[in-house]
Image (cartoon, grey):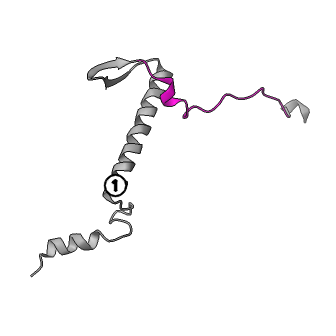
Amino acid sequence: MPDVASANAADRRKDGPSANGAPQFSGDEFVASVARSLVQAAKQAHLVAHQTGTGVAYSRDGQFGIYKPDPAMYEDLVPPPFEDEQILATSADK
């Protein structure tokens, strides 16, 4: 006689959203999504450290420390500077 708990677990693993509506991933997809999330979190940490003038705490070459934020980490998160601004209209023009 099959175990009811394992049968219910097998039913829940079918394709489609999980019970809470989140998409289900295979093992490789899940690991890849976690890796992308960790990289995004690291980029955000470097950006916030740059904006606040603080350091980022992490382990580099086995040494834990507080390091200066690396601009290469957050450069894709910062919008490019505006080109020479041209005023198209002002409230005085009305």
Residue that label 1 marks: 28
- x and y percentages locating residue 36 in the rendered image: 41, 44
Does 77 appear above or below 13? above
Residue closest to the eye, 73 or 51: 73
Rendered-image quadrant of the N terminus: bottom left
- x and y percentages locating residue 91 in the rendered image: 84, 32
- x and y percentages locating residue 66 in the rendered image: 34, 18
Q: Which of the 4 image quadrants contains residue 57?
A: top left
Q: Secondary structure at mark 1?
A: helix
Q: Which of the 4 image quadrants contains residue 46?
A: top left
Left of 35 or right of it: where is 5? left
For this orientation, the residue located farthest to the bottom is 1
Rendered-image quadrant of the C terminus: top right
For this orientation, the residue located farthest to the right is 93
Left of 83 or right of it: where is 63? left
Does 27 appear above or below 86? below
Left of 51 or right of it: where is 15? left
Q: Is residue 74 magenta?
A: yes
Magenta residues, start to end = 68-88
Q: Which of the 4 image quadrants contains residue 20?
A: bottom left
Label tally: 1
**What residue is shown at x 35% (from left), y 59% (from top)?**
25
**What residue is shown at x 26% (from left), y 74% (from top)?**
11
- Main secondary structure found in the magenta portion: loop
**What residue is shown at x 16% (from left), y 71% (from top)?**
6
Q: Residues within 10 Å of mark 1 (few under 14, many from 20)?
A: few
Which amino acid lies under the numbered mark 1 shown in the image of this protein? Asp
**What residue is shown at x 40% (from left), y 43% (from top)?**
37
Q: Is residue 61 magenta?
A: no
